[in-house]
Image: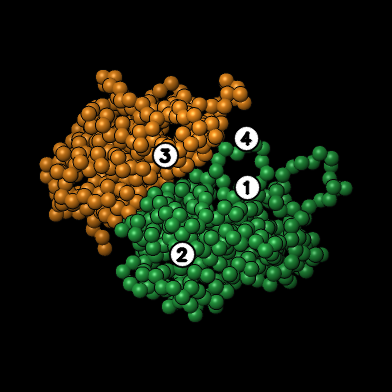
Amino acid sequence: MRELAEKFTQAFGPSGNEKEIRDIIKKEIKNYVDEIYVDNLGSLIAHKKGKGKKLLFAAHMDEIGIIVTHIDEKGFIRFAPVGGVYPIISLGQRIQFGNGQKGVIGVEFKDIPRDKIPPLSKMFIDIGASSKKDVEKTVNIGDMACFTREFVDLGKKWVSKAMDDRLCCAAIVKAIKNIKKTVNDLYFVFTVQEEVGLRGGKTSTYSVDPDLAIAVDVTGTGDTPKGFTMAVALGEGPALKIMDYSIVVTEKVKTFMKKVADKNKIPVQMEILQFGGTDAGAMQMTKGGISSGCISIPTRYIHTPGETVDKDDVEKTVKWIVSLSETDISKEGFGNKK
Amino acid sequence: MYLEKLSNLTGVAGYEHKIRKYIKDNIEKYVDSVEVDPMGNLLCYKKGKSRKNKVLIAAHMDEVGFIITQIGKEGFISFTTSGGIDPRVLPAKRVVIGNNEIPGVIHWKPPHLTKKKDSSIPVISNLIIDIGADSDKEAEKKVSIGDFATFDSKFSILDKNIMKGKAFDDRIGCSLLMDFLKEKSKFSFDIIAAFTVQEEIGLRGAAVLGEKTNPDICLVVEGTAAADFPRKEDEDISIFPTLGKGPVITITDKSIIVDRRLIDAIVSSAKRNKIKYQFKQPNIGGTDAGRIHKSRTGIPSAIISVPARYIHSPISISYLSDYKESFKLIKASLTDMLKAVH
């Protein structure tokens, strides 16, 4: 699991640039599924055939990043955010473009007092180039980059960039390999462009038209000094999403997911996220409405290069996905469309 | 070019009927069929030499403007905005209200009556339209609550190449689509030209287009904000659309990350046909493409725009040369765009 998590989180892939991570995932699962295809927006859809109703799991492949907006004569690069990039964690970070070109984020020190957080518009990327021409050999307007930071194993806890949401991609991949019987018709979707507005989740769900769709994503925790007011902590098990800014999970879906967790002795925390959304929100609003839920892996310091998780939570998430996959959802009232 | 007529017509989100009628009356004879969908979008169908593929091109008919909310005892008329308007452009501007285009002016105190150093920003709920009525009864003969209003600006040519008028966002796109439909040349794919409603208040008309038309690709044609004003040397550190530098290609905006294959196709057809082009600042604004590309299982969509200064105000300025270059680029790039995704 750790190797998979490291390989996935370290890959490059800001929104709209998911090719590298998509190829990695494809290679990893192709021998475990019956068919695999890429939709028009770039989401990877894997199908493990079963005779039952359609059950879909989804995690997003994209990570937050930056986009180049301007290159000045001296070779400094200006940028705008792709997804929720906060100035407070951006300064001094290292970034990398799709072609491997690296750089560091600097700031206009002259106008910014040391005790103030500068806006992103006062920051720039330095790739060590001496002129605009020099930059344009590797980087052009419109190119995207992601933050870089290595994977660290702290024993029970893991730290990396892009745990959001590659860790959940890894959990789904691990689950695909562990599933023994396929009573349901299973779809595993690795979506694109979640960080900029749940875009890939919408189109891929339209294409599959599942009877039950479950997103797997990270969520915040309330267990750090003066953290969010939130009853979710690291190491207490995966979270069952009740509500966030994009979705209110229906009673039927919540009850089913909790029942399966209880039966398999998986401890579950209740998640109410007072900001942010996940692909589940877009999935629920597709076509005539799709029954949708969300499994969340508790994560500290989301949208920083130091996203921190508990490995037991990850293992239990995998177990939950496998248990849900192996439970016949037609007997739980899903897919009886009239 | 239909821009003069289109620019002078009035119609905000939900009240696009005049524009729709004008386009329908003038374009029906050049296409195979037309249809108005339940949202009010006007769809024009033109068959290709082959019926295998479908290309959707879209421009929105609505403009930013106002909705009348209240008629006061003294005959003054309160309003709210429809679409994004900076309240600082409103005071002392001429407007026309409703289907009968009742003229009025938005009030503002002259300097004589203003306290010194009053540099407050106008608040829309405090502004009123004066149509010269001396009572509510008088005003209600001409204006009703719920009427729409727009800026009262007439199209003109400032110089051979310089066009001035209101609502270039997006009547300029409507005009380009009409010119395109009028062309005799037949493509090897079906064309659906959509003139959409309610873009300015949240891309609403376009929300139903992808589901209904199910095209292979989509191109949205827009009038976009030129940002080539006087500025301090280090004030803006972003690329920006400039008048005279040709059609503007979007890389990303708040509503879409454009499929790189489409951008590359547009750029290569521009280069091959020696058409000027420029890029829009990443991450600014949003267009109908934001809705369309997320429809169904995903519809690869791109945006080509004509740069226009001072959009969302009473007056915009654009170059005819940019209009013509944009027309050439739209015509040249559709086939390449379709190839790029197949």
- What's the distance in space between the residues labelled 1 and 3, CA to CA? 25 Å
Q: Is residue B23 above or below residue A58?
A: below
Q: Colour of chain B?
A: green
- What's the distance in space between the residues labelled 4 and 2, CA to CA? 37 Å
Residue drawn at 74 percent across, 53 percent down: B91
Question: Within 10 angstroms of label 2, few (less than 14), some, or many (20 or more) residues?
Answer: some
Q: Are marks 2 and 3 on the same chain?
A: no
In front: mark 2 or mark 3? Answer: 2
Chain bearing mark 3? A
Q: Is residue A184 visible?
A: no
- What's the distance in space between the residues labelled 2 and 3, CA to CA? 29 Å
Looking at the image, which is closer to me, B2 or B143?
Answer: B2
| Tag 3 residue | A144
Q: Which mark is residue A153?
A: none
The x, y position of residue B128, in whole percent, is 74, 56
Question: Within 10 angstroms of label 4, few (less than 14), some, or many (20 or more) residues?
Answer: few
Q: Are the residues tagged 1 and 3 within 8 Å (C-beta)? A: no
| Tag 2 residue | B331
Is A140 on the left or on the right of A163, as rendered?
Answer: right
Specify the amino acid type for callout 1: Asp
Comes first in the chain, label 4 or label 2? 4
Q: Is residue A149 visible?
A: yes
Chain bearing mark 2? B
Splitting the image into 4 quarters, where does residue A228 fall? top left
Q: Which mark is residue B234?
A: 4
Residue ranking furthest to the right = B112
Specify the amino acid type for callout 2: Lys
Q: Are marks 4 and 1 on the same chain?
A: yes
| Tag 1 residue | B228
Comes first in the chain, label 4 or label 1? 1
Residue drawn at 15 percent across, 38 percent down: A178
Task: Look at the image and tell me in which quarter the C terminus of chain A lies.
Answer: bottom left
